Amino acid sequence: MTFAKPSRRAVVASALAVAACRGQAQTPPAPLALPPLKSVAPFPMGAAISVGGLEDADYRAVLLANFSQVTADWEMKMEQILQSDGTFSFAKADMIAAFARQNGLRLHGHNLIWYIYAPEPFQRMAGDRAAFERAYANYILAVAGRYRGQAVGWDVVNEPTAEDGDGYRDCLWRRALGMDYVATALRYARQADPEAVLFLNDYNLESNPKKRATFLRLVEGLMKQGAPLGGLGTQTHLEADLAPGAIKAAIRDLASTGLMIHVSEFDVTLQGHPLMSRAAKLAAEARLAGEAAEALAALPSAQRYAFTTWGVRDSDSWLRHPPNAGAGDDSPLLFDDEGRPKAAAAAFERALGARV
Ligand code: XIL
């Protein structure tokens, strides 16, 4: 009996059907047993943390086992420190700094000046440039000065580039001081802390080449005028449909300045892209984690500042909390809700040469 050779599509379909059947029968994959991230990474491994998280023993266990650096999720931001009467409150920020000190963790300061803020005390001075700059200096000197000798770096200005890359953010700081608000902030931060690496930090630099070019024009201008800029933070908040090579291209571009590079807020949201299955998004997440690790590791060691994930476990992610509680089942980080390493963590380590 001759047997008509089935078409390639038919072969694939049946193979998949068989696999699916087999899949159903299989127990869920055994949790990955991976070496600690920080033991594999040729750069400091950072995580964004919050005082609330630190009350959770499992959170602390995953954090201390895998990470060697921390960034405060919100506790070191102006919204937390600057009170409406113009005084400063460092209670929460100090808790993060103390935890880092007590556990031998590097502290990355985030952030001093951000376009989203237009605090009352500053609005009241907007018409008086000298008074405004005095208060601006006073804030930066007080905050960066307080953690002098502990903070290894600061995001001095966060998100200076316009959303679409068409120029720079309009904000209270720019209206009061012009675009010089960036160089001015860097100079006062340097005065406050002679050692800390001073960063500009922004997002969509891998997914929007125009925005990256605009960001780099600002950087080149600052370097030309001798501003004490030491590093560039690429937040790396990614979506699952990001094309292969986009992260590498961005990091190569940013590193061409010779400055230190910080993958400063890594996560991959599974939200959006309804045509992609959850499994496909998780596979893309793993691929992107590997690419980002490889891209940073490929830089000269003097330019590898750190790789920071924006949270510790999926359940801690800002993408799972108001105002971003878009999808309660978002899974953007390297560790799942229980603190178990995910495929993305294995891909991250494999990209760094670990046999996992
Ligand atoms: C986010 C925090 O994770 C949230 O908890 C907070 O509600 C809003 O800010 N870019 C940044 C971070 O530079 O500071 C933001 O952090 C996320 C986007």
Image (cartoon, rainbow, N blue to C red):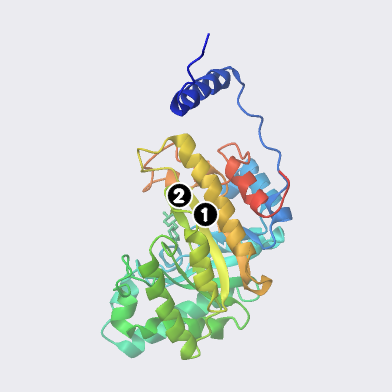
x, y percent for residue 325: 38, 43
Do we see residue 74 in this rendering? no
Q: Relative to 1, does residue 345 appear above or below in the rendering? A: below
Q: Give above or below for 132 relative to 298.
A: below
Disc 2 from disc 1: Cα separation: 8 Å
Which amino acid type corresponds to the residue marked 1 in the rendered image?
Trp
Residue matched to label 1: 310
Other-residue count near label 1 (Cα within 10 Å), few / some / many at <14 / 14–19 / ≥20: many
* Residue 274 appears left or right of 314: left
Quadrant hosting residue 204: bottom left
Seen at 68% across and 51% down, the residue is 37
Mark 2 touches mark 1? (CB < 8 Å): yes
Q: Earlier in the sequence, mark 2 or mark 1?
A: 1
Q: Is mark 2 within 8 Å of ligand 1?
A: yes
> Neighbour class for label 2 at 10 Å: few (<14), some, many (≥20)?
some
| Amino acid of disc 2 | Trp
Figure quarter occupied by ligand 1: bottom left
Q: Which mark is residue 318?
A: 2
Which element carries disc 1, helix, strand or loop? loop
Label 2 SS = helix
Identify the image quadrant of the C terminus. Answer: top right
Spot occupied by residue 227 in the image (x, y as percentages of width and height): 49, 87
What is the x, y in percent for residue 274? 35, 38
Name the residue nearer the viewer: 105 or 347.
Answer: 347
Looking at the image, which residue sits at the far front?
A: 2
Asked if ligand 1 lies within 8 A of label 1, the reply is: yes
Can residue 176 be spotted in the picture? yes
